[in-house]
Amino acid sequence: MQIKCDKKVNFTPNQFYESKELYLDGAEKILSVQAFARTTSIESLNGEVRVGYLLTIRALYLNQDGMVEKREESYDLTSSLRANVNANSFALVNTTVIGVEYHGSQNLKVRVMVEQKGCYIQNCNFEPIENPSLCYKKKSTNIKSICPLRNTEFVVDKNEKCNFNVGQMLCADTILSVKSVSIATDICEIEGIATIYFSHINEGELKGQSLSFPFSYELLSEGIKAGDVASITLLPISTTLNVTELDSGVELDVQILVEAKGYFEQKSEVEYAIDAYSKEYELALTNGEVVMEDDGCNFASKERFSATLPLDEITDAVEIISIGVPWVGASNVSAKPTITIDGVICSEIILKRESGEYARVLAEIPYSFDLKEDSTCSSDIDARLDIIELSARIRFGATLEIAGEVSVTVSGSSEKVVYYLEKAESIGERIKNDAVISVYLVGEGETLFDCAKALQSDEEELLALNPELDLPLKEGDKVLLYRPL
């Protein structure tokens, strides 16, 4: 019988540039350029995974009349990742933007750095020998089966009263963070946090706000059961804000269309043959080996970060107009001696100067988190950072003080090699031992199977003839076999 098991393998992160041009009619000054990307399709082929993704570029700018305008373009694009996969392989790929560069005004040229990360499931099946006429020495091990979750879309609703005014809405974008996933039979209960960053025009001025709130969702997941481990990614597809004016402030009606995707892992114990013999025949044994995933790690934590950044060539900043959607500009993970994640978190911040002019600042906040010392992760380590909040304030007109919180999810594994008995072929009859009594002296590390194999008997018979034996056997024990005349 074939033993089925799986191993999760991370793709080598793929980073590349996409260059686009936006025509901004009448643009006098660029205030903000942001880019967003998300995976829309994944197709496994022989030797590669083809990824479809949507890239959106947005520009806010001042026109010739000093009014703020918005231009946004989206592009359906494709890329590929090389991997040891075939057409039936399950793969999961996340596409994100980790850098944006631009120049020009009316003919705005934008270069976006895109990163694609993810994993695929590699099959590690093996088939030990099965023959009821043979005597076997067996061993057990834990195996892992990895099953894809059905991609699901759902809507997060929120109604919130706010003590500020909102004018003409320009754009709204969402970051989703998974706090926890609880497993029951056929259900994943997801607890998360949604943070919305939105820009609007209020009384002729550009303004930016953010809104953060918790949410939950029951994801139907056929086949999952308590004790399994699920890895789930939530992607915001669209965000809609409806504004109702109140006597004091506004009421915001929020709707976020969310896509959930991922996989779950099930562990089980299997027994397989590692040695065999026949009472009747001499055997030629063939061993096989398979590299499979051992117990690894899957944990999450919340981490704080902060930084003080100088405002290059700006000494008269008086107000933060808006904080753009933050993103992880770079990330590295290592496992020795602790699991350490370091990199840069970025955000585009628009300031107002004493002259009343807007100024754009790209804040790059370095971080380094030491997460765990006793982790069993040793290979295929992946870390995902979801930004929960980001705040900033101006100091002395020339410095930004920035602080925030992220949710860090780490997954990884270690490998083990399983050696098993793959084939046993008869190479002739065994020479019979005609002695009435045979005595076997147990050697170091030997088991009752080794004694039975040497005595051309079986374990049950030896236990019946040697009731005084204590298992496991010790070096120097004597095992007797009595043969009828």
Image (tube, helix red, strand yellow):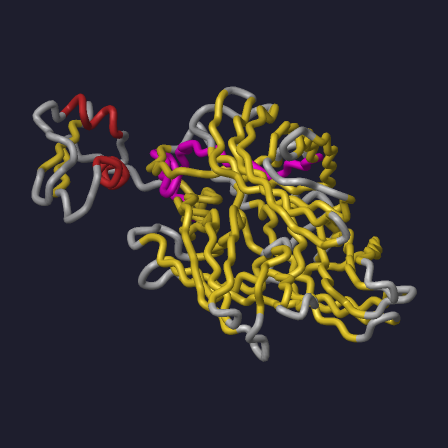
Q: Is residue 195 left or right of residue 301?
A: right
Q: Residue 189, position in %: x, y?
A: 52, 26
Q: Is residue 35 left or right of residue 408?
A: right
Q: Residue at x 11, y 30 (%)?
A: 470
Q: Residue at x 47, y 63 (%)?
A: 401
Q: Quadrant of residue 373?
A: bottom left
- Can I make out residue 74 in this image? yes
- Can I make out residue 2 in this image? no
Q: Residue 474, position in %: x, y?
A: 11, 41
Q: Residue 207, position in %: x, y?
A: 68, 51
Q: Residue at x 9, y 37 (%)?
A: 478
Q: Quadrant of the C terminus?
A: top left
Q: Quadrant of residue 481?
A: top left
**In this view, 266 is above or below 375:** above
Q: Magenta stretch: dominant SS?
A: strand
**In this view, 294 is above or below 313:** above
Q: Is residue 252 left or right of residue 59?
A: left
Is 470 in front, or is 437? Answer: 470
**In this view, 313 is above or below 427:** below
Q: Is residue 275 magenta?
A: yes
Is 264 in front, or is 408? Answer: 408
Q: Residue 323, position in %: x, y?
A: 61, 55
Q: Is residue 23 left or right of residue 53?
A: right
Q: Residue at x 40, y 32 (%)?
A: 269
Q: Is residue 280 magenta?
A: yes
Which stretch did the figure color magenta?
Answer: 257-284
